[in-house]
Image: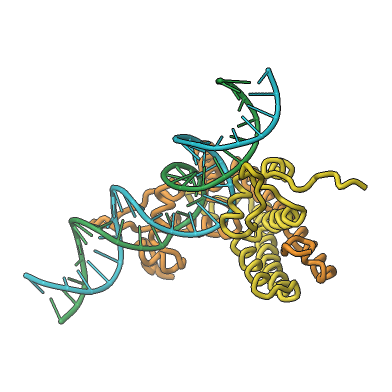
Chain colours: A orange, B yellow, C cyan, D green
Amino acid sequence: MNSNSKYPIPIGELAKQLSITTRTIRYYEEIGLMPEPQRMDSGVRVYGREEVLRLKFILKLKELGITLHEMHELAEIYRSEQSPEKVMPRLVQILDTHIAQIDGKLSRIAQLRADLATYRHRVAELGLTENP
Amino acid sequence: MNSNSKYPIPIGELAKQLSITTRTIRYYEEIGLMPEPQRMDSGVRVYGREEVLRLKFILKLKELGITLHEMHELAEIYRSEQSPEKVMPRLVQILDTHIAQIDGKLSRIAQLRADLATYRHRVAELGLTENP
DNA sequence: GGCAAGGTTTACGTTAAGGTAAACCTAAAC
DNA sequence: GTTTAGGTTTACCTTAACGTAAACCTTGCC
């Protein structure tokens, strides 16, 4: 075991590790999703383990289609309640809403795809043409 | 049977019927997704059955997450090939791509939801907090 | 000492899919 | 004849999530 100085990590390296840009990290700070980090004497932002975990979670949720706005809402709940127990229901609710939407869209698009395969010769009638 | 003058239909009524705004219809024309329609003497746009079908199809695809850009691509293929047979493969391909993306997202988000239910008490570690 | 790498802040640019407003026209209604 | 409803074009505004550029600073390196 080593206290292998992985942390604190400067913004540039963190960005590189997560395959995002420093702009993105600063942007999340700008809109209040990320906390104001420690700075080096030169003013460079450096991040600790906590903040890195938080950022990773943000990226994960984003990848799943949760908007930064929704995350902000969750962060607000946490900030005012200081309890994960209060955050969970809302997070689950948001996830369920997304799941429902995605699920519906998936079945409808699959249905359309099936219809197209069956009625291949009738594409024209679906309106992709101006000539009957 | 009546030639129940449903067509040609002026832009305002069409918009109302489809629950969109006239701006949207004009926008689709602007970007070349809808053809330039007939006009009344006053200059008002009027649409025939063909164009209405086309617009409905556009709205359907849009609802399913197909971008206007992708539709434009399909329209281009049709315009140059003049054959639905040429359009179909690309349309199916686009749909498949979307299905794959949606499907992946759906399973990942469902997985996260399940994880949250199981590790409810560990939300903090997921980074939604700044305090270990 | 000088420059290149990598920061900093401030601020304007971008994309998608329209919204909204201004200035004008015309047809129907009162 | 003038208000009202519904068009027309032109053109700037909006939101999300950053990109990009300008002007400046600090640190390591030759």
A25 is higher (above) or lower (below) than D11 = below
Q: Identify which residue, A111 or A40, lies in the foreground.
A: A111
Taking depth in this image into account, of B12 and C26 the one nearest to the observer is C26
As drawn, is D12 to the left or to the right of B118?
left
Question: Is A106 placed left or right of A36 in the picture?
Answer: right
Residue B71 location (% of width, % of height): 64, 63
Q: Nearer the viewer, residue C1 or B41?
A: B41
Q: Can residue B125 be seen in this view?
A: yes
Splitting the image into 4 quarters, where does residue A115 fall?
Answer: bottom right
Residue B75 place in picture, x, y as percent: 65, 66
Name the side, left or right, on which B41 lies relative to A15. Answer: right
Tally of numbered tags: 0
Estimate the x, y position of residue D16 in percent, counting from the top left.
51, 50
**Residue visible at 68% across and 73% down?**
B90
Q: In which quarter of the image is residue B35?
A: bottom right
A76 w.r.t. B105: above or below: above
